[in-house]
Image (tube, rainbow, N blue to C red):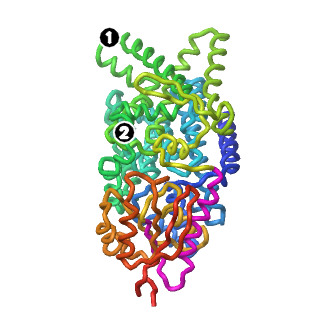
């Protein structure tokens, strides 16, 4: 009950913090897109009842449906979209802490459980993602749940826990498509345990049934969405789009570097120390065995085996793509914390009580060190301080920046934003949405000839849905697909993805623009050749001019 109370307290404190900052942070392109999906499902519920809602949430989609589907349910009661979405994410964040505690406690005892939960609950990267409407916290929670249920199954010797494990690995890809790799890693960990354990036939049967159950659950979404999902994963994982989000270093070193940045240096050393202790104790334990077979069985039966296997397998899977993604390696924080917690449990139990108590206090203080900066966002703890490590480079010690600010600071000198601009960003998207929605006789189809981080098709869609309008038809230029020439843009506007657009939004400039950037002059030339005329001139908070164009054709309501 103490652990549950601590998790509830974590949820409440973070919810209070998120609500206090709700108006001070503009949603980025991903958050606005995911919330729009949830609001669209809610709109279907209000318009066509449960059958309409189900038709919407079960429709083919390249985006994993679990989080947006869950968000759409309370939205039907009229709750605010942003706070409702963040409440769902924080609930998953709390579950991630709880499942990590359970997995570590069951594997290595109470001390391991508390240390592991502390690591996750205070991990800077995890806290930041728990404050954004993305799929990182849900995937982290489900991965930790997978580790816990597999551990509880005792190498799949229990039918109920084996089936629970199958449900988790099946649901995980529904929370985030890329986590199908994590499901495969957990299934592989289970198989290794089955092979190393006795009672082979029954365990293999349970493994096969649990995997079949997981596949069946995943296929409820993947089967109708196969082409969309495979195209999305290959393009962004290994195709042209992977280069847009590349890690600084290739392979597993780049993944570990990214993970270390999310941890900050204090958590990095707490985790590394625990992992080293586990490795030392594990090697000594295995070397005491007389034969190769007994050595393998000792390794597989070790308390931290499932978590360690999951971390190594997850890192290996992530190293196959240059796409750093959004918090990809951070989702391994649960099993990584379990390994570290097991190591600290070993170390603390072998020390005398005064020494172990002092050392535990140091661990707590080190983990809490970056939290004031992330909460207060100012002062000594809110200032970016880094320390350099070999290979990994500079890691934060303290910092008060949120994820968007950090991306802006490190990704490109052309990215700019301030808290004071947040409402202006919303008003700009609302202005364009109103222009589209309120125009009598003009179809609500919109094209964006640029890709701004805070003003884009997703933010306009969100404002339209929040105003009670049905979903707009949207298109946004893709510089990886469309060449930066007037002829290519004209083809996009007339026969391509934006052929049905009656409204076009352009914005010359480079500030807050994702790379590669489209050619603004060529887009303007293409707009004029595709029967668009300038209708309104606006400005964005980052200083860019915005031009709203209307297509003057009969199909778009022109007389």
In percent of width and height, residue 267 lies at 55, 27
Q: Residue at x 47, y 80 (%)?
A: 443
Tell me residue 20's x, y (percent): 70, 49
**Other-residue count near label 1 (Cα within 10 Å), few / some / many at <14 / 14–19 / ≥20:** few
Label 2 neighbour load within 10 Å: few <14, some 14-19, many 20+? many
**Displayed quadrant of residue 429:** bottom right
In depth, the one of 143 and 388 nearer the eye is 388
Compare residues 491 and 200 and report the one nearer the observer.
491
Q: Is residue 437 above or below residue 69?
A: below
Quarter of the image with the C terminus in it: bottom left
**Foreground: 99 or 204?**
99
Dominant secondary-structure state across the stretch colored magenta: helix
Residue 130 in percent (x, y) is at: 57, 44
From this viewpoint, is residue 437 visible?
Answer: yes
Mark 1, secondary structure of its residue: loop
Residue at 52% across, 41% down: 409
292 vs 371: above or below: above
Tag nearer the camera, 2 or 1: 2
From the top left corner, tell me how far across and down residue 404 is, in percent. Answer: 54, 46
State yes or no: discs 2 and 1 in contact (Cβ < 8 Å). no
Disc marking residue 526: none
At 45% across and 36% down in the image, what residue appears? 150
Q: Which residues are magenta?
A: 419-448
Tell me which corner region of the image, top left, top right, bottom left or bottom right, holds residue 282: top left
The answer to whether residue 220 is seen in the rendering is: no
Residue that carries the numbered disc 1 in the rendered image: 290
Q: Give the structural element (helix, strand or loop) at label 2.
A: helix
Of residue 224 and residue 131, the one placed in the foreground of this image is 131
Quadrant hosting residue 96:
top right
- Mark linked to residue 318: 2
């Amino acid at each position: 009950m103490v652990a549950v109370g601590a998790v509830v307290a974590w949820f409440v404190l973070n919810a209070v913090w998120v609500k206090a900052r709700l108006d001070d942070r503009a949603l980025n392109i991903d958050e606005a897109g995911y919330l729009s999906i949830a609001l669209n499902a809610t709109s279907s519920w209000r318009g066509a009842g449960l059958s309409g809602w189900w038709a919407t949430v079960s429709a083919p989609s390249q985006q994993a449906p679990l989080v947006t589907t869950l968000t759409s349910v309370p939205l039907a009661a009229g709750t605010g979209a942003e706070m409702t979405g963040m409440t769902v994410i924080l609930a998953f964040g709390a579950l991630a802490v709880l499942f990590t505690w359970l997995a570590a406690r069951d594997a290595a005892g109470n001390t391991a459980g508390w240390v592991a939960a502390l690591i996750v609950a205070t991990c800077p990267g995890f806290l930041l993602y728990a404050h954004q409407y993305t799929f990182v916290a849900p995937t982290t929670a489900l991965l930790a749940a997978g580790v816990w249920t597999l551990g509880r199954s005792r190498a799949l010797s229990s039918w109920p826990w084996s089936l629970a494990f199958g449900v988790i690995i099946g649901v995980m890809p529904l929370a985030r498509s890329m986590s199908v790799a994590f499901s495969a890693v957990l299934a592989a960990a289970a198989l290794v345990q089955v092979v190393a354990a006795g009672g082979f036939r029954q365990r293999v049967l349970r493994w096969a049934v649990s995997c079949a159950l997981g596949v069946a659950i995943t296929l409820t979404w993947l089967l109708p969405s196969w082409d969309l999902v495979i195209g999305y994963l290959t393009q962004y994982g290994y195709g042209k789009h992977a280069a847009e989000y590349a890690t600084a270093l290739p392979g597993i070193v780049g993944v570990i570097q990214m993970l270390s940045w999310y941890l900050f240096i204090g958590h990095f050393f707490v985790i590394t120390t625990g992992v080293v202790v586990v490795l030392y104790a594990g090697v000594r334990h295995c070397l005491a065995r007389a034969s190769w077979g007994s050595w393998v069985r000792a390794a597989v039966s070790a308390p931290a085996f499932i978590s360690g296997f999951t971390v190594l397998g997850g890192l290996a899977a992530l190293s196959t793509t240059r796409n750093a993604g959004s918090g990809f390696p951070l989702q391994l924080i649960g099993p990584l914390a379990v390994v570290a917690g097991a190591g600290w449990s070993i170390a603390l139990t072998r020390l005398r009580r005064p020494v172990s108590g002092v050392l535990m206090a140091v661990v707590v203080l080190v983990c809490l060190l970056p939290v004031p900066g992330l909460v207060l966002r100012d002062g000594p703890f809110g200032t970016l301080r880094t320390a350099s490590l070999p290979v990994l480079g500079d890691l934060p010690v303290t910092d008060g920046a949120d994820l968007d600010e950090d991306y802006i600071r490190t990704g490109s000198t052309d990215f700019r934003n301030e808290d004071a601009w947040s409402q202006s960003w919303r008003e700009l998207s609302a202005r364009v949405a109103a222009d589209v929605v309120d125009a009598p006789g003009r179809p609500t189809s919109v094209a964006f000839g640029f890709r701004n981080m805070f003003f884009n098709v997703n933010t306009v869609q969100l404002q339209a849905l929040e105003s009670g309008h049905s979903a707009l038809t949207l298109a946004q230029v893709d510089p990886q697909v469309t060449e930066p020439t007037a002829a290519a843009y004209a083809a996009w506007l007339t026969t391509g993805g934006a052929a049905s657009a009656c409204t076009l939004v352009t914005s010359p400039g480079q500030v807050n623009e994702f790379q590669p950037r489209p050619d603004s002059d060529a887009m303007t030339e293409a707009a004029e050749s595709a029967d668009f005329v300038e209708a309104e001139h606006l400005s964005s908070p980052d200083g860019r001019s915005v031009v709203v164009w209307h297509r003057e054709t009969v199909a778009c309501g022109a007389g």
